[in-house]
Image (tube, rainbow, N blue to C red):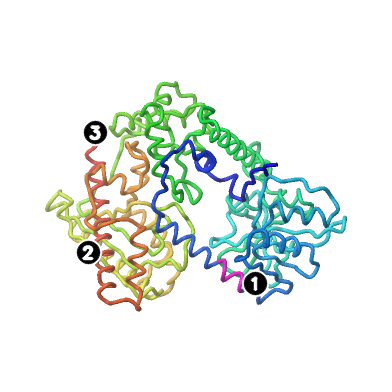
Amino acid sequence: MKEMTRLDSRAAITCHEFLHKRFAPNSFPGLTPDAPDPVVEEFKNQGLHHEQMTLETLRVLLKGFHQIDQTQKRESIERETAQAILDPNVLVIAGGFISGIAEGELAKAFGVPHVPNDRASKPDLMVRIGTRSDGRPSWAPVDIKSHTAIEENKSNWVFSSPLQDLLPNQDQRSEGRLQFEDLHQLAHYTRHFQRLGIEGDDLWVGIIGRDLENCVWSRIGDVVIGRGKNQDSFLAVHDEKFAKAKEVIELSIIENEEPTKKSGIIPINSSGKMGCTACMYKSTCLKAMQDFDGGSGHVTLLARVTPLVVEKNFPEIASIRELIERPATNDAMMTAKIRARVWQRGIPELIDPSSPLEIPEADIEIDIDLENSMEALRESEIDEPIGEDRLYLYGFGIHDRTKNKDWRSAEIDTYSDYSNTEEGEFSVMSRMWDRLQLEIQKAETAGNSIKIFHYSPHEFTWWKRFAERFVGRPGVPTLTELEEFKIRYLVDLYPIAQRISFPTMSYSIKDLAKLAKFTWSVDQAGGANSLFKYRDAINPKIDQRARDEAINWLDSYNRDDVGATFAVRAYMRSLKI
């Protein structure tokens, strides 16, 4: 008898088209994966390193810690997992794996028939919570993550326990919720444990985050998402998504055996660490989305038209052509129709034509752009720092428009420090702050107006960090002074750009720079390369020539980033909308 297809802990949050390709390979002859994304690979490697550090810490702190050798065959790992679950002296299991063999061993020990499951579970840790009323051990799944464990949320509670105690501490309660993707993995394990009869009454689940100090616990049965009338049980939402993934796999298997029986799955553009960013088939899927409906394109190609926006506002529409043709039934659909029309025509339009586009102008315009060591992750929509995030370079361009209106006449320069220290960060920020204050004073003394432009709130976040981290040092502004500085001089171009619909897939500065006919002078310009160039720049173990090459690359890259903000602003000013 053929064993059922078992789904892993990421099934509920895995892209359906990825599942389609995996389980219907006959429908994709010649399919080849993209080259590994270096940022994603680095992120994975750092995550594995963090996990190993955590396990080493726990091994020292905890009694009854049982770590399973992962070099064994899968069958041996499963049997050892089952034995550890049943051993009263084992309190924590690291590296356990539960599938058919472990299930069979547990069923035999409990004296019940073995009923095959549709899940396979490999939590980073299993923690013994106690003993059930039927005498079986109760276990809780815990995963180790390199990000912060808690998200702000007023509808849920979390409970923190120091690693040396580990078990849930109900006295340490605070508002918040575990991250959405983490909850889905933990829900997967919970449902599996329930089928095996080893869950606890409270359905505890936990995350050990990057602080390596606490385990954050949650009663997953009590977790809710949404608010008010739209509030749902998280486990119910998980069950629905898991069932949908299972259906996709079943349809894909049928299609693989009989190609005429199409599954109906089509690629969609999704973001984040579980979306297209980290997918090995993103190039193939992008082409399929562009070719969808005879070349009309899939609606998720449109900027800010996410799968969630589609699901909530026009779930029956998949193609850009169809979106244009259908009458709008809500505001979100009306905005999406504008984006669809712009995509089709290639001519930018205002999202709200009733409100004129205004881009502030000044006699002296300064554009600024910083570089921080973890920016590549933000660009890749992976909002999880790996290591200490350091600001090491700040570029600026000064354009005196009283002398020459062409932004290309701007003088661009940089401040940098590659010591990879807090003091180095202070040096860059303080020099930049002093220079901006000097330029403001010069302009206003001469009777000239002055504005300082940047792209995204990222810049001001770092200025606040500067004020908070180095509070009290000479020359460091207070938060109040920063807010006044922001109101009087700073102009964030990002929200202004978002008032316009462009024929692009995103509002990234690099996408808009293409419309402005601006190109970077360095090879492989982008946050991914900057991550590795910075690593070379601060590495004392490599040749000084290689370090200098990396520093020069970073300096040129940042100068072009500054130039890009000038170019994009000039382009937006030129639009007749």
Task: In this rendered view, identify the residue nearer to me: 357 or 216.
Answer: 216
Label 1–label 3 contact, CB within 8 A: no
> Which stretch is magenta?
51-56
Residue 58, numbered label? 1
Residue 12 in the image, given as x and y percentages of width and height: 60, 44
Is 190 left or right of 325, judged from the image as shown?
Answer: right
Tag in front: 1 or 2: 1
Magenta-drawn stretch, dominant element (helix, strand or loop): helix
Query: Rounded to the nearest whole Å, what is the CA distance between mark 1 and mark 3?
Result: 62 Å
Identify the residue position indicated by label 3 in the image: 576
Residue 547 in the image, given as x and y percentages of width and height: 29, 72
Q: Which of the marked residues, 1 or 2, is nearer the chain's N terminus?
A: 1
Identify the residue position indicated by label 2 in the image: 413
Residue neighbourhood size for the residue with mark 1, other residues' Cα within 10 Å, grouped as few (<14), some (14–19), many (≥20)? some
Secondary structure of the residue carrying tag 3 is: loop
**Quarter location, residue 541:** bottom left
Secondary structure of the residue carrying tag 1 is: helix
Task: In the rendered view, tell whether residue 457 sits above or below residue 386.
Answer: above
- Type of residue at label 3? Lys
